[in-house]
């Protein structure tokens, strides 16, 4: 019997539940999971060290989730041994030490590219998934620019 390879991608205002996500992308054959979690920093060094009170994340959810599916599809194409994939981005007001994003990949063994697949996932998410971040601190607020510039047709 062949199990369907699980994939989860979502934009959510809810807290990220690592145990639930990991359970949902783990198969009977899974022996390794590589997990990346981005978090809100209380001190940011971009443009000179400054304090962050909170971040506000926004997204156009249908487009963002479509791009997350694209990232998952790219991971599957590059690392066919990856069993499960979870890509979750939080939106809303998030305070320091709060997880904002999670990328998790599972596989039968740790030496199958699972670490590289998770790294690729966060790099591609930052590159193509439309999520906007406003940083709020005691000295004011600013929208933090990403590096993504859409190409025609994206």
Image (cartoon, rainbow, N blue to C red):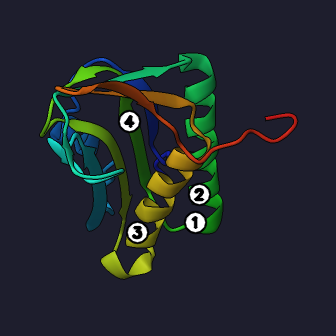
From mark 1 to mark 4, how far is it between C-alphas? 21 Å
Q: Is residue 1 above or below residue 94?
A: below
Nearest to the eye among marks 3 and 1: give it. Answer: 3
Q: Is residue 11 above or below residue 79?
A: above
First in sequence: mark 4 or mark 2?
2
The residue at the point 81 percent across, 42 percent down is: 151
Identify residue for label 2. 76
The residue at the point 63 percent across, 24 percent down is: 63
**Label 4 close to label 2 by CB (< 8 Å):** no
Identify residue for label 1. 80
Q: Is residue 29 above or below residue 89?
A: below
- Callout 1 secondary element: loop
Q: Residue furthest bottom?
A: 111
**Label 2 close to label 1 by CB (< 8 Å):** yes
- Callout 2 secondary element: helix
From mark 3 to mark 1, how far is it between C-alphas? 10 Å
Within-10-Å neighbours for mark 2: few <14, some 14–19, many 20+ = some
First in sequence: mark 3 or mark 1?
1
Within-10-Å neighbours for mark 1: few <14, some 14–19, many 20+ = few
Within-10-Å neighbours for mark 3: few <14, some 14–19, many 20+ = many
- Tell me the number on the disc at residue 146: none
Q: Residue 27: where, in percent of width, then height? A: 33, 53
The residue at the point 51 percent across, 47 percent down is: 126
Identify residue for label 4. 88
> Camera-side residue: 128 or 132?
132
Q: Residue furthest right?
A: 152
Q: Quadrant of residue 77?
A: bottom right
């Amino acid at each position: 019997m062949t199990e369907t390879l699980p994939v989860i991608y979502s934009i959510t205002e809810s807290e990220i539940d690592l145990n639930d996500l990991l359970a949902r992308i783990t198969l009977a054959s899974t022996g390794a999971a590589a997990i990346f979690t981005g978090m809100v920093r209380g001190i940011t060094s971009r443009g000179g060290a400054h304090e962050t009170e909170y971040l506000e994340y926004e997204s156009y959810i249908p487009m963002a989730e479509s791009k997350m599916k694209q990232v998952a599809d790219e991971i599957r194409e590059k690392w066919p041994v990856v069993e499960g994939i979870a890509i979750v981005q939080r939106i809303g007001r998030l305070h320091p030490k709060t997880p904002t994003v999670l990328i998790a990949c599972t596989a039968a063994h740790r030496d199958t590219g699972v670490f590289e697949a998770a790294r690729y996932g966060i790099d591609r998410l930052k590159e193509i998934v439309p999520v906007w971040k406003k940083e709020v601190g005691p000295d004011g607020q600013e929208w933090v620019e990403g590096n993504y510039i859409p190409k025609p047709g994206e």
